[in-house]
């Protein structure tokens, strides 16, 4: 169950990073809406990470959480923020996904 909690925490990390991207693009009340989304997502992500680390090793949990956030944020950037796409970006995203899966596989 804590692996599911950790994955959800990683998805909220993607959400707070994406909200930061939207804060940068907006002004006025819309900017505050995205900033509120950032704070809410950040809080949820951290609370779920804390919960997951109660039974998972901190090093593994943090690496998986960061990996989910990194991969998800790069993909959000590509699909929603018009970030550049190249062979090497995709290659390293795939290797990062493989590393996260590997950490899960060897974790006790």
Image (spheres, helix red, strand yellow):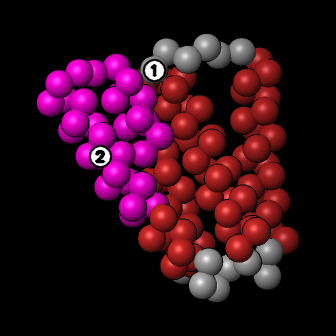
Residue at image position (54%, 23%) is 78
The quadrant of the rendering that contains the C terminus is: bottom right
Please tell me which residue lies in front, 12 or 37.
Answer: 37
Disc 1 to disc 2, C-alpha distance = 17 Å
Does the rendering let one see residue 4? no
The quadrant of the rendering that contains the N terminus is: bottom right
Q: Disc 1 vs disc 2: Cβ atoms closer than 8 Å?
A: no
Closest to the camera, between mark 1 and mark 2, is: 2
Please give the range of residues in magenta.
16-45
**Residue 104 position in % (x across, y down):** 75, 67
Q: Is residue 78 above or below residue 95?
A: above
Q: State the SS at label 1.
A: loop
Q: Main secondary structure of the magenta part?
A: helix
Q: Is residue 83 above or below residue 93?
A: above
The answer to which quarter of the image holds residue 47 is bottom left
Give the residue number, with chain letter if any, for mark 1: 81
Give the residue number, with chain letter if any, for mark 2: 37
**Residue 70 position in % (x across, y down):** 63, 42
Would residue 8 appear left or right of 65 to someone viewing this image? left
Residue at image position (63%, 41%) is 71
**Residue 90 position in % (x across, y down):** 72, 27
């Amino acid at each position: 169950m804590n692996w599911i909690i950790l994955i959800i925490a990683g998805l909220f990390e993607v959400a707070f990073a994406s909200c930061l991207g939207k804060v940068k693009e907006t002004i006025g009340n819309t900017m505050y809406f995205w900033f509120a989304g950032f704070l809410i997502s950040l809080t949820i992500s951290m609370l779920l990470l804390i919960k997951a680390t109660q039974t998972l090793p901190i090093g593994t949990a943090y690496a998986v959480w960061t990996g989910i956030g990194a991969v998800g944020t790069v993909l959000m950037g590509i699909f929603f923020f018009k970030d550049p796409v190249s062979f090497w970006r995709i290659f390293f995203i795939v290797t990062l996904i493989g590393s996260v899966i590997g950490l899960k596989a060897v974790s006790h």
